[in-house]
Amino acid sequence: MIELSTRAGACLVRVTAALVIGGWLAVPAIAQRAVGDRPLRAFESAVVEQSRPASPRTLNVAPRTGDFTAENVSLAELVAFAYGVRLDQVVDLPAWAASSTYHVQAQAPDDLEGTDVQLLVEAVRPLVAGLLFDYFALEAHRGQSPLYVLDQAGGGSRLRESADQRGAPGVLAPNASGLGGERVRAVNIVMALESLIGRPVLDHTGLAKRYDVDFRWDPNEHDPQQLAAELQRQLGLTLRAVPVDVLIVDRATELKARAAPPRG
């Protein structure tokens, strides 16, 4: 069992394989997408609904049968599991995909029963990917995308240490001249940069103290190259892009009252 951390959301539907509502019929995912060299497959049956109140956050593949259950799990986390990537490798999902959470219960095909546990998990991934195609119209492809790394410049950081190292941490927020804050930690700087450039930023600075920051910058300016130049000049920090393997989501729609027939 894998413990997950998500936020609760709203979107309710109960679906069962072999049911067609309002004339909607899914194009079989087996003809549309694959995970690696394996075509997507269907569960024997599946239920997808809004997460239950105060339910634990879990994702589980039954060790003998391959039956799949998830509770209080976002679409983003389901996508990461289905395609075997880290959550931070899933890009271009809509905002609701990280906030709305679901309960999933699905019965695996009989031919998976008795499969070795590690192989069983890999065999279940295409089943989950097929479920996501059918019920979220999810389409994705693998590629590369820039991920940014924040580090200290060669001469070291120019950040000014806060006089108060024990007070509540501050935040780096927009002000009249740019971005500023007191008792700011490195994580706060990273969060502000992610908001500016719209991409993940990894903290490699090694900075563990709290700092008073006055960064002169137009928050409406999103050019990473100019931002990197000013970070180095003003704060003694470097921001560099590193290409990483990612799963790029081409399409995802919110779950609606619909279902698809089982696929062979």
Image (cartoon, rainbow, N blue to C red):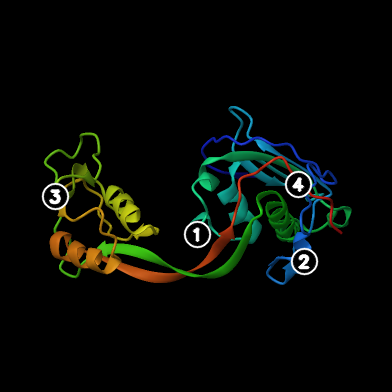
Q: Position of residue 91 (x, y in %)?
A: 50, 59
- The answer to the question of whether label 2 and label 1 lie on touching residues, with beta carbons closer than 8 A, is no
At mark 2, the secondary structure is: helix
Q: Is residue 114 left or right of residue 70?
A: right
Q: How far apart are the two marked residues, 3 and 1, measured between alpha carbons?
A: 31 Å
Task: Pick whichever of labels 4 and 2 is earlier in the sequence.
Answer: 2
Task: Pick whichever of labels 2 and 1 is earlier in the sequence.
Answer: 2
Q: Amino acid at mark 2?
A: Ala
Q: Which residue is identified by label 2? A: 31
Name the quadrant containing residue 145.
bottom left
Task: Pick whichever of labels 1 and 4 is earlier in the sequence.
Answer: 4
Q: Residue at x 19, y 43 (%)?
A: 181
At mark 3, the secondary structure is: loop
- The answer to the question of whether label 4 and label 3 lie on touching residues, with beta carbons closer than 8 A, is no
> Can you tell which mark lies on residue 208?
none
Q: Which residue is identified by label 4? A: 62
Around disc 1, counting alpha carbons within 10 Å, would you say few (fewer than 14), some (14 to 19), or many (20 or more)?
Answer: some
Around disc 2, counting alpha carbons within 10 Å, would you say few (fewer than 14), some (14 to 19), or many (20 or more)?
Answer: few
Between marks 1 and 4 in the image, the one whose residue lies nearer the viewer? 1
Q: Which residue is identified by label 3? A: 177
Q: Position of residue 203 (x, y in %)?
A: 33, 58
Q: Which residue is identified by label 1? A: 91
Pick the front one: 259 or 189: 259
Q: How far apart are the two marked residues, 2 and 1, measured between alpha carbons?
A: 24 Å
> Does any portion of residue 72 appear in the rendered image?
no
Q: Amino acid at mark 4?
A: Ala
Around disc 4, counting alpha carbons within 10 Å, would you say few (fewer than 14), some (14 to 19), or many (20 or more)?
Answer: some
Task: Pick whichever of labels 4 and 3 is earlier in the sequence.
Answer: 4
Task: Pick whichever of labels 3 and 1 is earlier in the sequence.
Answer: 1
Q: How far apart are the two marked residues, 4 and 3, measured between alpha carbons?
A: 55 Å
Q: Residue at x 52, y 65 (%)?
A: 246
Pick the front one: 54 or 34: 34
